[in-house]
RNA sequence: GGGCGAUUAGCUCAGCUGGCUAGAGCAUCUCGUUUACACCGAGAGGGUCGUAGGUUCGAAUCCUACAUCGCCCACCA
């Protein structure tokens, strides 16, 4: 018997130790693998690259992140062990609005107000906050065994990356793909920023449906209406009475016999006391409400379109903070929309213009981050015309240059590309990358000139009361031009996805970068399916645009990790599972195995502790079987065994080789569940249950050092080593631990991570 | 309203291009203190593969309806 080896595998202490060995080996770098292959005279195959999804540096990693890392790492280790210089490129995301929201909350808990703190100080502290989180995240990544190249780790706000992001912006602007436009946008009154359509969610909420009479201007019409409808005007139904202050028209369907005769007539908008016309539009639903729609182009996307079609005036009555503004009766100025709605309803009711109020439930848009109701308002923002980019991305999918697993998600992606809308990329935030633009004179002047095409710049002062002070031109650049004149900086930030959309090539140094030349395009993008449109779609569009090549050939979307009862994990429900706790309890390998068998693309995976426990048992089985084999080898036999020439035609050896080939195939085809099942089945039920028992019997009566023993033990050892290799991508810690035990006895060399499977 | 997907043992799922007497893990039950491992071993029970049709020599696997569930997208006042 050799030295004492503990009966149970102590994952807690071993894992840390093993990770250090990997880290110090240099094998996490593709150069390390290249070097190793060269030394051993082996063929260096094509590089394998995964640019890892950078987690948001605003919180600890959750169990879903760990899932991604497990798959990425398994893919990487498999490639590394089959001759490919492998780069798993890690990073951290500044995550724009998300981090700004969460850090603002952190400050609030400390009683600090972001607005009092000011932009610069906020940025500084937010940076420190992010760095702290990034460092935690890095530790967690290592805990699951992620063999990433941390010498290349990047943060999305790294100046090197920012430069690349800016260059893309300049190029797109010059080619007319990026432009400034005045449109109706999603404004979050709480975050005080514009949001892209995709950054909003829909939720059913309770609301009101108010029926309001807009009396006709002409006596004659009033009479006619009274006869027909019993009131002296046309009745509109609305969920948002406060927007009536910004109404420009009432629209009816031209086919609607009730209102036909009134088209072209005028009504007096109550309270605001403005005359507005009745217009006809075939898009109006006769069945809905009263069939007459109050049109508020400034505060409803539908109305905005109708307004554009009919050349209606846009009247802003709600500002960026969700408060009443503009040319409205003074008593409403500054009110919250809800407050204003109530006040209006009261006044209308007193005037006898309110028919009724129904309580209803309806879908509204809310901010994805803070769940505040979105306020549609008109504003000037920066847009990307993504249409031509989406067309190219579609082509790439059609040609099979990029494949999405599972295939259903590929269809969803195609659908997204087919129905894509202009992408609003400007955000009124403090945290992120500033849009690198300067305005001669002022931003206001620039927008005014754009909106008032043909007008003389002299009119600017007349209309706005401000001096022009410049030409309104745009200058592109991080710093202001050094010439005379006044340049106003664009203060808006980029949507975080504008920079992360460039992640696959920006992290590789961009076009011309050494790493870019070697590692772009990458092979796999492994991520969660909930950011398919936000991120994967953007990376494809921007990657194809900038580099002419799709950034990755396979998109692998792992399953959704759920709470034990099958519900979504969420902070508010408190049903989250802490990955660190799971790892401490059962070990990283056990958790990884669970992902591989349960969190496949297209599936939902409720976290079941018993299953992870079962995997821990398997890991321990590996440990004990190895321990048994080692304990059976007498010290005096070590040399004989390591020099023994094995007969490769033995049936157990051949079966093991076939098994290895089978598992390699599974790995190649991303069938991790089948792979995990196969290694378990083979190791446990073939090697342990049958072969070890057989060999036990075969050598029972043999003397130590005998030919028979050396042969059998060599065979067993060879089978063990083969198993360790093929199991390594799945369960790297336990396999490397055993390998290192073998190294100590001079029964193996080097580091398992760098071993080649053949 | 549009798109996508699911429906197989108590639970979570495998079952690819039709040939299974339908599998795994976990759970359940019985037996076992054999010096690798009780984080173990030997064994058992448990499913008319959502429903109804169709194609076929043959269907969990292909087709068509229906039912139920889930996810995503969408400006219905």
Image (spheres, helix red, strand yellow):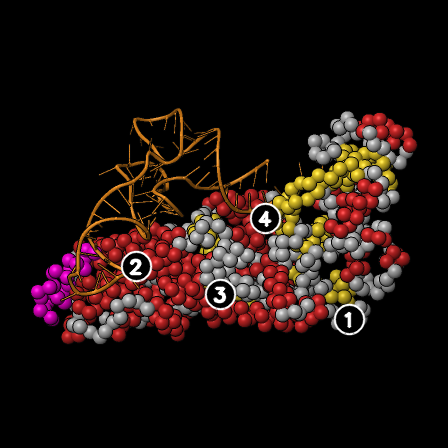
Image mark 2: chain: A
Distance from Cα at disc 2 to Cα at disc 4: 47 Å
- Percent x, y of residue B48: 33, 34
Q: Residue at x 19, y 62 (%)?
A: A716
- Residue labelled with disc 2: A618
* Residue neighbourhood size for the residue with mark 1, other residues' Cα within 10 Å, grouped as few (<14), some (14–19), many (≥20): few
Q: Kindly indicate the quadrant of the structure image that contains residue A22.
A: bottom left
Answer whether residue A702 is magenta in the image.
yes
Whichever of labels 4 and 1 marks the residue nearer the N terminus, that label is 4
Earlier residue among tags 3 and 1: 3
Q: What separation in Å lies between label 3 and label 1 (alpha carbons)?
A: 41 Å
Which residue in the structure is indicated by mark 3?
A90
Element carrying mark 2: helix
- Judge by depth and name the residue closer to the eye, B30 or A731: B30
Q: Is residue A696 above or below residue A377?
A: below
The magenta span reads: A689-712
Q: Are marks 3 and 1 on the same chain?
A: yes
Give me the C-alpha separation between circle 3 and circle 2.
Answer: 30 Å
Residue found 59% across the figure and 58% down from its top: A497
Q: Chain of mark 4?
A: A
| Numbered disc in front, either 3 or 1 | 3
Nearer to us: label 2 or label 1: 2
């Amino acid at each position: 018997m050799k030295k004492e080896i503990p009966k149970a595998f102590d994952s807690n202490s071993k894992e840390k130790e093993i990770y250090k060995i990997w880290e110090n080996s240099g094998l996490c770098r593709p150069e390390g693998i290249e070097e190793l292959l060269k030394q051993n005279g082996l063929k260096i195959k094509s590089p394998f690259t995964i640019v890892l999804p950078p987690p948001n540096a605003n919180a600890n990693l959750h169990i879903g992140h760990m899932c991604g890392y497990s798959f990425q790492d398994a893919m990487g280790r498999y490639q590394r062990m089959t001759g490919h210089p492998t780069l798993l490129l890690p990073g951290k995301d500044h995550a724009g609005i998300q981090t700004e929201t969460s850090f603002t909350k952190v400050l609030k808990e400390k009683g600090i107000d972001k607005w009092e703190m000011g932009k610069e100080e906020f940025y500084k502290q937010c940076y420190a906050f992010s760095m702290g989180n990034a460092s935690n995240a890095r530790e967690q990544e290592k805990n699951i065994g992620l063999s990433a190249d941390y010498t290349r780790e990047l943060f999305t706000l790294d100046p090197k990356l920012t430069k690349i992001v800016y260059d893309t912006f300049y190029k797109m602007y010059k080619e007319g793909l990026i432009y400034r436009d005045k449109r109706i946008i999603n404004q979050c009154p709480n975050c005080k920023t514009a949001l892209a359509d995709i950054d909003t969610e829909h939720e059913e909420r309770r609301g009101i449906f108010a029926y309001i009479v807009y009396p006709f201007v002409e006596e004659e019409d009033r009479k006619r209406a009274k006869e027909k409808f019993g009131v002296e005007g046309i009745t509109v139904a609305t969920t948002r009475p406060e927007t009536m202050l910004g109404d420009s028209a009432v629209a009816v369907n031209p086919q609607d016999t009730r209102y036909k005769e009134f088209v072209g007539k005028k009504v007096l908008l109550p309270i605001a006391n403005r005359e507005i016309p009745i217009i006809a539009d075939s898009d109006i639903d006769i069945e809905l409400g009263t069939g007459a729609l109050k049109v508020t182009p400034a505060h409803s996307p539908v109305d905005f379109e109708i307004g554009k079609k009919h050349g209606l005036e846009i009247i802003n009555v709600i500002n960026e903070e969700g408060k009443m503004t503009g040319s409205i009766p003074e008593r409403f100025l500054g009110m919250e929309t809800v407050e204003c709605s109530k006040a209006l309803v009261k006044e209308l009711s007193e005037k006898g213009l309110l028919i009724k109020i129904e309580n209803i439930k309806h879908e509204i848009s809310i901010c994805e981050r803070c769940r505040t109701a979105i306020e549609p308002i008109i504003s000037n923002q920066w847009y990307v015309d993504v249409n031509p980019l989406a067309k190219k991305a579609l082509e790439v999918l059609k040609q099979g240059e990029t494949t999405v697993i599972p295939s259903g998600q590929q269809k969803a992606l195609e659908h997204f590309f087919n129905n894509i809308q202009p992408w609003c990329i400007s955000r009124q935030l403090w945290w992120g990358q500033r849009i690198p633009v300067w305005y001669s004179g002022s931003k206001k002047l620039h927008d005014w000139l754009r909106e008032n095409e043909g007008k003389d710049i002299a009119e600017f002062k007349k209309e706005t009361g401000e001096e022009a002070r410049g030409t309104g031109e745009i200058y592109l650049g991080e710093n202001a031009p050094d010439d005379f004149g006044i340049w106003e900086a664009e203060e808006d930030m980029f949507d975080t996805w504008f920079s992360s959309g460039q992640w696959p090539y920006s992290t590789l140094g961009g076009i011309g970068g050494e790493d870019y030349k070697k590692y772009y395009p990458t092979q796999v993008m492994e991520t969660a399916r909930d950011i398919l449109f936000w991120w994967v779609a953007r990376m494809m569009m921007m990657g194809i645009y900038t580099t002419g090549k799709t950034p990755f050939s396979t998109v692998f979307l792992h399953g959704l990790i759920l709470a034990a009862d099958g519900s979504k994990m969420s902070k508010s429900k408190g049903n989250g599972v802490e990955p660190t706790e799971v790892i401490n309890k059962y070990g990283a390998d056990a958790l990884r195995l669970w992902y591989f068998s349960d969190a496949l693309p297209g599936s939902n995976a409720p976290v079941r502790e018993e299953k992870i426990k079962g995997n821990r048992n398997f890991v321990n089985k590996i440990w004990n079987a190895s321990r048994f084999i080692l304990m059976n080898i007498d010290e005096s036999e070590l040399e004989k065994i390591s020099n023994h020439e094995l007969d490769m035609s033995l049936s157990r050896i051949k079966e093991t080789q076939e098994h290895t080939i089978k598992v390699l195939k599974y790995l190649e085809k991303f069938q991790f569940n089948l792979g995990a099942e196969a290694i378990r089945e083979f190791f446990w039920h073939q090697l342990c249950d049958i072969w070890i028992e057989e060999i036990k019997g075969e050598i029972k009566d043999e003397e130590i050092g005998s030919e028979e023993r050396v042969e059998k033990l060599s065979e067993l050892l060879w089978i063990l080593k083969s198993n360790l290799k093929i199991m390594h991508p799945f369960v790297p810690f336990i396999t490397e631990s055993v390998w290192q035990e073998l190294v100590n006895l001079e029964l193996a060399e080097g580091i398992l991570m760098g071993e080649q499977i053949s």
